[in-house]
């Protein structure tokens, strides 16, 4: 052995974890996601789901993660604009590893099982199961979770609103488990002059009476998953201003007669992260399209699909955050500094627990929100309460999840030290991928405006107060009681703000929306983690989640005890092992 290799071996084995040392199974090593699976999936699905997610968790931690690293660094999609004859073919090359990941993930039913019962189970799964898969997938490849999301959205729109002929032609391909035959989907909204202002879109749809189809002409400036077999596209069908003049169209990459549609890719976007998904500037030149539903309800339909995408975005955010936390925990456990593992230092423990609290509280609330969403989209008798709560919580939790994901990835890099900034480690990619979650499907400003619409048009705040009060009254554990006045006081603050909104001009009203949104989010997150704590205490006899709830309460509503120089009461330090390793806590001191 030469001197250099001896030094390298000694440094890695005695001091620094090797970059290639990995978590083995993202599902089995995540006790909280197992808990949420059991909490929200029907009991008769538990054994099947545990088996499937165990297998999937190993796959995403292994080969899918390896392919994701290659795609991010060396295997990004490439546009082949012209063939050797100079003809515009707008072909998008994807590496073989990416295509293998697509075959495996679609083959595991992430979209299909929403429409076709897996043989072993004998019934279709709720959206919650697909989102559990998306959470695990996002720990390694959130860039590919975007095409999955868009395929889910397309399938939803075609299934709900397309005519029987269109549905028969395209829904089987969108929902198959055959990775070789799957029709990946895309949704193209954004235009250069519009951005979030979809009502400013200029793409037009002209009906060709002779051919019996629509012809779409225009530009989509940020078309994610360009090259997908099926895209749902908004285009103007009349002269009505804003979103009222927009219809929704299915535009295939390849027409039914086998010819390529008149869709051209100007260029692929060179993005900060999520490099797996080809995002492009797309030109439609009399492209053949098929109307979905009623001509003037296009924006309404797309808004429904946007809920699916926003949930996926929130799920991807906490999936990325989970990976960032797990990597930081592993690294600090094995990294030696000043004669002992880094994790033994109290300031490191504080940072890890802070990440964990954001992760656990936000993830639990997201899956409760998904439970509402499932009731709305799969049940014929969803209550108004369920409908409004889903409508209210989706933008709020999408907003918060993106924020904590970026913050957590930054913390993970810091806990890795200089190695966290090196591309051989996964942490830089996690931060780059997390950043887009604050932008895709609505920035914080757009989501805050969405909250205002729910309040003004659907009286969403009244339903929110009603649900929170009802669930507060159901809290019965003695450890839950100190949390009730905190939530009640916050509700009073929210009501005070709401009473003043109507008297404010538009600028001052909108200025207060994000603080209002954050306070409503904090109330909901605290309530949900306390409910989880009661559930876990009753079923497992552990009070661990009450500690998580107390740490979040201090973080969101008061001066954290850990930062109070006048106290020696440090929940994060006193219960560190039980918190980060999901150990049982029998008593609260």
Image (spheres, helix red, strand yellow):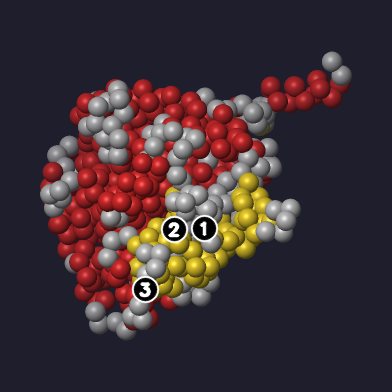
Q: Residue furthest top?
A: 1
Taking the spot 69% from the left edge, 22% from the top edge, the residue there is 14
| Disc nearer the start of the sequence (1/2) | 2
Residue denoted by label 3: 237
Figure disc tally = 3
Between 77 and 587, the one lying in front of the other is: 77
Residue denoted by label 1: 261
Report the mark closest to the observer, 1 or 3: 1
- The CA span between labels 1 and 2 is 8 Å
Between 176 and 423, the one lying in front of the other is: 176
Circles 1 and 3 in contact, beta carbons < 8 Å: no
Which part of the image, by quadrant, shows the C terminus? top left
Between 538 and 126, the one lying in front of the other is: 126
Which part of the image, by quadrant, shows the N terminus? top right
Residue 245: image quadrant is bottom left
Taking the spot 87% from the left edge, 19% from the top edge, the residue there is 2
Residue denoted by label 2: 251
Percent x, y of residue 435: 53, 54
Residue 555 visible to the viewer: no
């Amino acid at each position: 052995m030469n001197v250099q290799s001896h030094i390298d071996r000694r440094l890695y084995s005695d001091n620094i974890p090797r970059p290639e040392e990995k978590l083995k199974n993202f599902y089995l090593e995540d006790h909280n996601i197992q808990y949420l699976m059991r909490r929200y999936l029907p009991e008769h699905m538990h054994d099947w789901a545990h088996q499937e997610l165990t297998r999937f968790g190993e796959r995403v931690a292994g080969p899918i993660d390896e392919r994701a690293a290659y795609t991010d660094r060396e295997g990004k999609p490439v546009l082949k604009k012209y063939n050797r004859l100079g003809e515009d073919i707008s072909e998008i090359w994807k590496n073989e590893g990416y295509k293998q990941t697509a075959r495996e993930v679609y083959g595991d039913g992430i979209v299909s099982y929403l429409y076709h019962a897996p043989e072993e189970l004998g019934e279709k799964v709720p959206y919650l199961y697909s989102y559990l898969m998306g959470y695990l997938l996002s720990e390694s490849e959130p860039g590919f979770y975007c095409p999955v999301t868009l395929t889910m959205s397309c399938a939803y729109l075609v299934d709900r609103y397309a005519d029987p002929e269109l549905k028969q032609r395209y829904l089987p391909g969108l929902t198959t488990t055959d990775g070789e035959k799957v029709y990946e989907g895309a949704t193209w909204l954004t235009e250069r002059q519009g951005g979030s202002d979809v009502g400013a879109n200029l793409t037009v749809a002209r009906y060709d009476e002779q051919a019996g189809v629509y012809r779409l002409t225009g530009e989509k400036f940020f078309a994610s998953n360009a090259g997908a077999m099926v895209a749902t596209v908004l285009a103007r069908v009349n002269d009505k201003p804003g979103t009222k003049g927009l219809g929704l169209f299915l535009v295939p990459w390849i027409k039914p007669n086998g010819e390529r549609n008149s869709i051209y890719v100007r260029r692929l976007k060179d993005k900060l992260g999520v490099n797996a998904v080809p995002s492009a500037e797309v030109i439609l030149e009399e492209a053949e399209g098929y109307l979905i539903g009623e001509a003037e309800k296009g924006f309404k339909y797309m808004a429904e699909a946007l809920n699916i995408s926003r949930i996926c975005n929130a799920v991807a955010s906490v999936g990325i955050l989970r990976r960032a936390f797990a990597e930081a925990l592993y690294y600090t456990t094995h990294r030696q500094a000043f004669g002992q593992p880094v994790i033994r230092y109290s300031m490191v423990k504080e940072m890890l627990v802070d990440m964990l609290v954001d992760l656990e509280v936000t993830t639990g609330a997201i899956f409760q929100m998904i439970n509402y969403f499932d009731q709305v989209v799969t049940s014929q008798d969803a209550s108004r309460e369920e409908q409004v709560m889903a409508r209210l919580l989706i933008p709020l939790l999408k907003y918060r999840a993106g924020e904590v994901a970026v913050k957590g990835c930054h913390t993970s890099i810091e806990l890795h030290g200089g190695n966290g900034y090196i591309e051989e480690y996964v942490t830089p990619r996690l931060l780059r991928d997390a950043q887009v979650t604050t932008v895709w499907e609505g920035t914080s400003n757009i989501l805050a405006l969405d909250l205002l619409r729910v309040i003004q048009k659907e009286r969403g705040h009244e339903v929110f107060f009603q649900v929170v009060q009802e669930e507060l009254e159901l809290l019965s554990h003695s450890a839950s009681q100190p949390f009730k006045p905190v939530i009640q006081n916050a509700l009073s603050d929210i009501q005070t703000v709401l009473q003043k909104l109507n008297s404010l001009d538009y600028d001052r009203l909108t200025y207060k929306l994000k603080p209002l949104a954050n306070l409503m989010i904090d109330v909901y997150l605290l309530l949900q983690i306390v409910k989880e704590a009661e559930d876990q205490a009753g079923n497992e006899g552990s009070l661990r989640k009450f500690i998580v709830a107390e740490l979040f309460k201090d973080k969101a509503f008061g001066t954290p005890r850990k930062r109070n120089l006048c106290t020696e009461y440090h929940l994060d330090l006193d219960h560190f092992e039980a918190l980060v390793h999901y150990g049982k806590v029998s008593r609260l001191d």
